Image (cartoon, grey):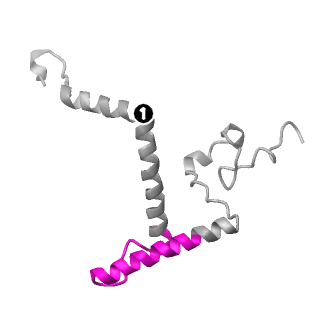
Amino acid sequence: MVSNCTGRRRELMLRQQQTEHDAIRSIRAEQQTDAWKARYKIRAGVEGTISQAAARCGLRRSRYRGLAKTSLQHQLTGAAISLARIDAHLTSTPRARTRTSHFAALCPAALTLDGAQQGPNQPTASRATVGPS
């Protein structure tokens, strides 16, 4: 940075290291391959299972002290999740939709991709009135 007394403007120059830049570019290119996407699908499934265990069965905290009891709790929690999924499959319970953000809820239903209801105050495309009524 140059001071104002020389009459020049202040400038901020950012220099990214070439090695960091090349690493980021190669990682982003790898993420576009089918092999990377297949590996990421596995991770996404595991993340969903962990999220369900934490939200539904309180897996963030252990009820017990000690490795043996905590391990037993994790195994029983896994069995409970499996039973819940089997029940949902047998009863044809639909999967929950992804939460709609408050910002996305402001979008009219006609502008959404699937036409689903986006918020508590937004009508669906089938109930929307077109023209004067």
Q: Is residue 96 above or below residue 42?
A: below
**Which of the image's four quarters has the N terminus?**
top left
Pointer 1: residues within 10 angstroms few (<14), some, or many (20+)?
few
Answer whether residue 25 is visible to the viewer in this image. yes
Question: Of residues 16 and 123, which is closer to you in this image?
Answer: 16
Q: Is residue 7 left or right of residue 128?
A: left
Q: Is residue 67 left or right of residue 42?
A: left
In which image quadrant can residue 22 be found? top left
Read off the magenta span: 55-84
Farthest top residue in view: 7
Question: Of residues 123 and 21, which is closer to you in this image?
Answer: 21
> Measuring 53% from the left and 70% from the top, which residue is drawn there?
82
On the image, the x and y values in percent for residue 26 come to 30, 30
Answer whether residue 15 is visible to the viewer in this image. no
> Measuring 11% from the left and 23% from the top, which residue is drawn there?
3
On the image, the x and y values in percent for residue 71 come to 35, 77
> Measuring 42% from the left and 33% from the top, which residue is drawn there?
33
- Residue 122 on the magenta span: no
On the image, the x and y values in percent for residue 44 come to 45, 52
Q: Amino acid at mark 1?
A: Thr
In which image quadrant can residue 19 be found? top left
Q: Which residue is mark 1?
A: 33
Q: Secondary structure at mark 1?
A: loop
> Measuring 72% from the left and 39% from the top, which residue is drawn there?
110
Q: Main secondary structure of the magenta part?
A: helix
